[in-house]
Amino acid sequence: MTSIVSTSFTLIPNQKYRRSSRRSNHSCNILGSDSQNLSTLGDFKALPLELFQIILEYLSVKDISMLSMVSKTISHRLINYISTSSGSRRLLQQDFHNLELSGRKQGSYMLEHYRSLGLLFKRCTLLLPTKERLKYIHKILSETLTAGWDELECHRVYNFLCELTNLPRKMHTVVCSKPGSARKLELRIRLFCRSVLLDHWTQQSDSAFWLTRILKPWPMVNQARLLYIIFGPISSQDGQVVWQKMTEGPTDETSLKGLADAIKLLYDNDTKEWTADDVISLVDELSVVPREWLLENNARLLILSGNNICFTFMASKAVNGRANELARMIVFLALVCEKDLYCMDWAVKMMQKVCKVFSTQVERNNFLQNVENAFARVIMDMLQSVMSGRVTKECPELQITAARKKKNPIFCSPSLKRQKAPTSKQRRKMSRGQNIEAFHFPQMI
């Protein structure tokens, strides 16, 4: 018994001793790590951080870049120094037009300074992964180097980039050739414009400025082509532009969101170089790239572009006497609202607003009659396709019916299936708008 008690007694302090040993080892590791970091600072370890940064003020950029290769700890301190306000003011000089220096001397001095600065960034981030290095350098260039530049200087930057990369020549090649014939070049232009000029800005006005620089030198037809190349739908396999997406069948919101956002960017930022008529003309040209879009896709683009652009686009058609096209667009706006589960009240209010654009009651009545006839034609096309058991690209609204069958069993009722197809005489009457009481609109005005 005595041995058992003594054994249990001796186990307890041993366990405590092991735990305390682990604690002491852990604390020793921490102290060892800290001491190792301090040891890599050399004689600088005796100096506080503020004094270390003051010393850096007296070193040239080349000397600082050499110092960054001494150890990882010093390199990390230098990165922090560059990010401070004092380091940015000293290293990222923006006084490009100092009148005290002659033109040639100023140019050579600034060129040498930024060459040394690039070497410093390279050496400071040498041990970081490539992805992190690119993020850091990009942040410095986009948020610090060009901060506060006026519009004229940004114009010079764009002209320099165009000259350096031959961007205008590459754009001329893709806009003057058949869509899709230079897929790799289209992809290069898209990636360059998005990654270098457009996507990283936090202010929409900045993105609108650079998008304007890209589009404005070209005629309206080529502007629409470039807009599709930069913001249009791409293949999920190789990332290349899909040109037939809008013409072969109905597409989803994801494929149109980039184009809609770009259109809103040009319309909403009140840039002097883009009037409302310019943006509407661009949307009109875009709807025939590379060929005329399905009306459903055109209507979905207008909905995603917002109320102002949608109304302005349709009001333009009303003013220019294109009531028949406008009526068909109203029909497909309603179909997209039904298919994408938008509020149908929006389509009704938009139609009421468009009706007020017409100056006379005769024009309003003619427009409403065109809308009625357009609804009748769409429903007759759908009915004929259902009865014949086929679905065509020209009748995308059949997909609405197929989607609603799962949600509403009324579409699957036997009475609908037993209906006979209308005769040719009945179809002619219905196409003229006769005997279609169900589609008469209430007084809108």
Image: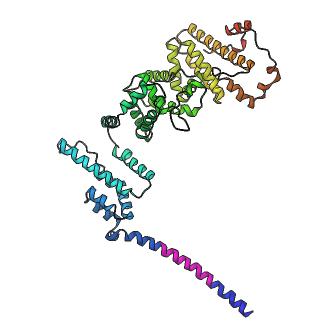
Residue at the (57%, 34%) spot, across then down: 254
Spot occupied by residue 317 in the image (x, y as percentages of width and height) = 51, 16
Spot occupied by residue 21 in the image (x, y as percentages of width and height) = 55, 79
| Residue 34 drawn above or below residue 129 | below
Left or right of 14: which side holds 240? left
Q: Is residue 187 visible?
A: yes
- Magenta segment, which residues? 14-29
Q: Quadrant of the C terminus?
A: top right
Q: Is residue 441 visible?
A: no
Reply yes or no: does residue 18 show up in magenta. Answer: yes
Residue at the (38%, 44%) spot, across then down: 142
Q: Quadrant of the N terminus?
A: bottom right
Spot occupied by residue 111 in the image (x, y as percentages of width and height) = 25, 46
Reply yes or no: does residue 245 show up in magenta. Answer: no
Nearer to me, 65 or 180: 180
Left or right of 437: which side holds 349? left
| Residue 8 drawn above or below residue 399 | below
Q: How is the image coloured?
A: rainbow
